Protein backbone atom coordinates (compact mmCIF):
# COMPACT_ATOMS: atom_id res chain seq x y z
CA UNK A 1 0.00 0.00 0.00
CA UNK A 2 1.30 3.51 -0.86
CA UNK A 3 0.44 4.92 2.57
CA UNK A 4 1.83 8.32 1.67
CA UNK A 5 -0.81 8.70 -1.07
CA UNK A 6 -3.93 7.79 0.95
CA UNK A 7 -6.35 10.69 0.50
CA UNK A 8 -9.24 9.73 2.78
CA UNK A 9 -10.06 7.41 5.66
CA UNK A 10 -12.64 4.80 4.78
CA UNK A 11 -13.70 1.44 6.15
CA UNK A 12 -11.10 -1.07 7.31
CA UNK A 13 -8.51 -1.94 4.65
CA UNK A 14 -8.81 -5.10 2.49
CA UNK A 15 -5.85 -6.74 4.26
CA UNK A 16 -7.70 -6.45 7.58
CA UNK A 17 -10.83 -8.03 6.08
CA UNK A 18 -8.66 -10.87 4.77
CA UNK A 19 -6.98 -11.46 8.15
CA UNK A 20 -10.35 -11.49 9.92
CA UNK A 21 -11.76 -13.93 7.37
CA UNK A 22 -8.88 -16.38 7.93
CA UNK A 23 -9.28 -16.10 11.70
CA UNK A 24 -13.03 -16.77 11.52
CA UNK A 25 -12.46 -19.76 9.24
CA UNK A 26 -9.67 -21.46 11.16
CA UNK A 27 -9.86 -20.61 14.85
CA UNK A 28 -13.26 -22.32 15.42
CA UNK A 29 -11.87 -25.55 13.92
CA UNK A 30 -8.91 -25.46 16.30
CA UNK A 31 -11.17 -24.70 19.26
CA UNK A 32 -13.54 -27.58 18.40
CA UNK A 33 -10.64 -30.01 18.24
CA UNK A 34 -9.42 -28.86 21.67
CA UNK A 35 -12.88 -28.74 23.26
CA UNK A 36 -12.00 -31.35 25.89
CA UNK A 37 -8.79 -29.56 26.89
CA UNK A 38 -9.67 -25.87 26.92
CA UNK A 39 -6.43 -24.84 28.61
CA UNK A 40 -4.56 -25.87 25.46
CA UNK A 41 -6.82 -23.70 23.33
CA UNK A 42 -6.14 -20.77 25.65
CA UNK A 43 -2.41 -21.41 25.24
CA UNK A 44 -2.89 -21.48 21.47
CA UNK A 45 -4.60 -18.07 21.59
CA UNK A 46 -1.79 -16.65 23.73
CA UNK A 47 0.95 -18.03 21.49
CA UNK A 48 -0.83 -16.83 18.35
CA UNK A 49 -1.24 -13.31 19.73
CA UNK A 50 2.35 -13.18 21.02
CA UNK A 51 3.46 -14.03 17.49
CA UNK A 52 0.97 -11.91 15.54
CA UNK A 53 1.24 -8.57 17.34
CA UNK A 54 5.07 -8.13 17.11
CA UNK A 55 4.91 -9.04 13.41
CA UNK A 56 2.10 -6.55 12.87
CA UNK A 57 4.10 -3.80 14.60
CA UNK A 58 7.19 -4.65 12.53
CA UNK A 59 5.10 -4.27 9.39
CA UNK A 60 3.79 -0.92 10.64
CA UNK A 61 7.39 0.29 10.82
CA UNK A 62 7.83 -0.76 7.18
CA UNK A 63 4.97 1.53 6.09
CA UNK A 64 7.18 4.49 5.27
CA UNK A 65 6.82 7.25 4.48
CA UNK A 66 3.26 7.66 5.63
CA UNK A 67 0.90 10.63 5.42
CA UNK A 68 -1.34 11.90 8.22
CA UNK A 69 -4.40 10.38 6.49
CA UNK A 70 -2.52 7.13 5.92
CA UNK A 71 -1.71 6.95 9.63
CA UNK A 72 -5.38 7.59 10.47
CA UNK A 73 -6.40 4.70 8.22
CA UNK A 74 -3.83 2.42 9.83
CA UNK A 75 -5.09 3.48 13.26
CA UNK A 76 -8.60 2.43 12.26
CA UNK A 77 -7.22 -0.87 10.90
CA UNK A 78 -5.33 -1.45 14.14
CA UNK A 79 -8.48 -0.90 16.18
CA UNK A 80 -10.38 -3.40 13.99
CA UNK A 81 -7.69 -6.03 14.51
CA UNK A 82 -7.55 -5.30 18.24
CA UNK A 83 -11.30 -5.90 18.50
CA UNK A 84 -11.06 -9.22 16.66
CA UNK A 85 -8.10 -10.39 18.76
CA UNK A 86 -9.99 -9.60 21.97
CA UNK A 87 -12.83 -11.81 20.70
CA UNK A 88 -10.49 -14.54 19.43
CA UNK A 89 -11.17 -17.16 22.16
CA UNK A 90 -14.93 -17.16 21.47
CA UNK A 91 -15.05 -16.13 17.81
CA UNK A 92 -17.65 -18.11 15.87
CA UNK A 93 -18.87 -19.83 19.03
CA UNK A 94 -22.51 -20.19 20.06
CA UNK A 95 -21.40 -19.96 23.68
CA UNK A 96 -20.05 -16.53 24.56
CA UNK A 97 -17.34 -16.81 27.18
CA UNK A 98 -15.29 -14.01 28.59
CA UNK A 99 -11.68 -14.26 27.42
CA UNK A 100 -9.14 -15.16 30.13
CA UNK A 101 -7.66 -12.07 31.79
CA UNK A 102 -4.13 -13.26 31.00
CA UNK A 103 -4.99 -13.31 27.29
CA UNK A 104 -6.83 -9.97 27.27
CA UNK A 105 -3.89 -8.28 28.98
CA UNK A 106 -1.53 -9.40 26.20
CA UNK A 107 -3.82 -8.11 23.45
CA UNK A 108 -4.49 -4.75 25.13
CA UNK A 109 -0.81 -4.13 25.88
CA UNK A 110 0.45 -5.12 22.42
CA UNK A 111 -2.21 -3.44 20.29
CA UNK A 112 -2.21 -0.28 22.44
CA UNK A 113 1.50 0.00 21.64
CA UNK A 114 0.66 -0.24 17.93
CA UNK A 115 -1.94 2.51 18.36
CA UNK A 116 0.57 4.69 20.23
CA UNK A 117 3.12 4.31 17.42
CA UNK A 118 0.58 5.62 14.91
CA UNK A 119 -0.51 8.47 17.19
CA UNK A 120 3.12 9.61 17.45
CA UNK A 121 3.47 9.42 13.65
CA UNK A 122 0.34 11.58 13.31
CA UNK A 123 1.72 14.25 15.65
CA UNK A 124 3.56 17.26 14.13
CA UNK A 125 7.32 17.06 14.62
CA UNK A 126 7.63 20.77 15.31
CA UNK A 127 8.42 22.01 17.88
CA UNK A 128 10.91 19.20 18.26
CA UNK A 129 10.99 19.25 22.06
CA UNK A 130 7.23 18.74 22.27
CA UNK A 131 7.35 15.89 19.74
CA UNK A 132 10.18 14.10 21.57
CA UNK A 133 8.56 14.50 24.97
CA UNK A 134 5.24 13.26 23.58
CA UNK A 135 6.97 10.20 22.12
CA UNK A 136 8.67 9.37 25.43
CA UNK A 137 5.38 9.79 27.30
CA UNK A 138 3.24 7.71 24.92
CA UNK A 139 5.61 4.87 24.07
CA UNK A 140 7.84 4.72 27.16
CA UNK A 141 10.60 3.38 24.91
CA UNK A 142 14.14 4.66 25.43
CA UNK A 143 15.58 2.76 22.46
CA UNK A 144 16.95 5.21 19.82
CA UNK A 145 16.37 2.61 17.08
CA UNK A 146 12.62 2.61 17.74
CA UNK A 147 12.58 6.40 17.70
CA UNK A 148 14.43 6.45 14.38
CA UNK A 149 11.86 4.04 12.89
CA UNK A 150 9.16 6.57 13.83
CA UNK A 151 11.14 9.34 12.10
CA UNK A 152 11.47 7.14 9.00
CA UNK A 153 7.70 6.61 8.99
CA UNK A 154 7.24 10.39 9.10
CA UNK A 155 9.58 10.72 6.12
CA UNK A 156 12.07 13.07 7.79
CA UNK A 157 15.40 13.72 6.10
CA UNK A 158 18.57 12.28 7.65
CA UNK A 159 19.77 15.75 8.62
CA UNK A 160 16.52 16.34 10.52
CA UNK A 161 16.73 12.90 12.09
CA UNK A 162 20.23 13.52 13.45
CA UNK A 163 19.17 16.59 15.41
CA UNK A 164 16.00 14.86 16.61
CA UNK A 165 17.94 11.82 17.81
CA UNK A 166 20.37 14.02 19.71
CA UNK A 167 17.46 15.83 21.33
CA UNK A 168 15.86 12.47 22.13
CA UNK A 169 18.96 11.31 23.99
CA UNK A 170 19.06 14.58 25.94
CA UNK A 171 15.40 14.39 26.94
CA UNK A 172 15.47 10.82 28.23
CA UNK A 173 14.85 10.75 31.99
CA UNK A 174 17.81 9.71 34.11
CA UNK A 175 17.19 6.29 35.69
CA UNK A 176 17.28 6.15 39.50
CA UNK A 177 20.70 5.40 40.99
CA UNK A 178 21.25 1.67 41.32
CA UNK A 179 18.63 0.81 38.71
CA UNK A 180 19.56 -1.29 35.72
CA UNK A 181 20.10 0.83 32.64
CA UNK A 182 17.88 -0.19 29.75
CA UNK A 183 15.39 1.02 27.19
CA UNK A 184 12.34 0.66 29.44
CA UNK A 185 10.96 3.81 31.01
CA UNK A 186 8.54 4.28 33.86
CA UNK A 187 6.02 6.47 32.05
CA UNK A 188 2.45 5.16 32.02
CA UNK A 189 0.73 4.91 28.64
CA UNK A 190 -2.91 5.98 28.30
CA UNK A 191 -5.36 3.44 29.65
CA UNK A 192 -7.29 1.18 27.24
CA UNK A 193 -10.46 3.12 28.18
CA UNK A 194 -8.85 6.42 27.15
CA UNK A 195 -7.65 4.89 23.90
CA UNK A 196 -11.09 3.41 23.21
CA UNK A 197 -12.61 6.87 23.64
CA UNK A 198 -10.11 8.34 21.18
CA UNK A 199 -10.85 5.60 18.66
CA UNK A 200 -14.58 6.27 18.96
CA UNK A 201 -13.99 9.96 18.24
CA UNK A 202 -11.94 8.99 15.18
CA UNK A 203 -14.69 6.68 13.95
CA UNK A 204 -17.28 9.46 14.36
CA UNK A 205 -15.02 11.76 12.36
CA UNK A 206 -14.78 9.13 9.62
CA UNK A 207 -18.56 8.77 9.46
CA UNK A 208 -18.94 12.54 9.12
CA UNK A 209 -16.48 12.56 6.23
CA UNK A 210 -18.40 9.77 4.52
Image (cartoon, rainbow, N blue to C red):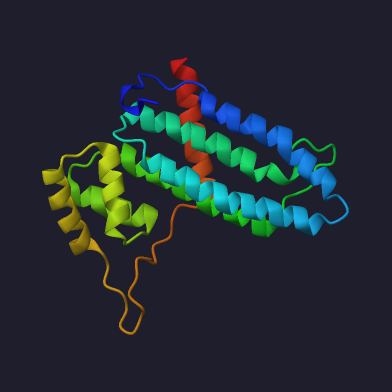
- Quarter where residue 95 is shown: top right
Q: Quadrant of the N terminus?
A: top left
Near-viewer residue (96 or 207): 96
Near-viewer residue (164 or 119): 164
| Residue drawn at point x = 60 percent, y = 56 percent | 105
Eyeballing the image, is 150 above or below 13? below
**Residue 12 appears in the picture as rendered:** no
Circle count: 0
Locate residue 77, reporting x and y percent.
50, 32
Q: Is residue 138 left or right of residue 133?
A: right
Locate residue 117, reporting x and y percent.
39, 45
Near-viewer residue (30 or 99): 30
Q: Is residue 57 left or right of residue 27?
A: left
| Residue drawn at point x = 43 percent, y = 29 percent | 73
- Quarter where residue 137 is shown: bottom left
Q: Is residue 141 left or right of residue 148?
A: right
| Residue drawn at point x = 11 percent, y = 45 percent | 159
Locate residue 195, reporting x and y percent.
49, 44
Locate residue 98, reporting x and y percent.
75, 49
Outermost residue, top side: 210
| Residue drawn at point x = 77 percent, y = 44 percent | 30
**Residue 194 appears in the picture as rendered:** yes
Eyeballing the image, is 195 above or below 105? above
Eyeballing the image, is 90 above or below 39? above
Amino acid sequence: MPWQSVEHVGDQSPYVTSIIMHIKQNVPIIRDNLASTRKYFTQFCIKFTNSFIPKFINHLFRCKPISMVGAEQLLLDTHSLKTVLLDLPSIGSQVLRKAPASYTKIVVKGMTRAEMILKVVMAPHEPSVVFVDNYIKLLADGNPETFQKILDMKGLKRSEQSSMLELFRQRLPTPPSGADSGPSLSFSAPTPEQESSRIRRLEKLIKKRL
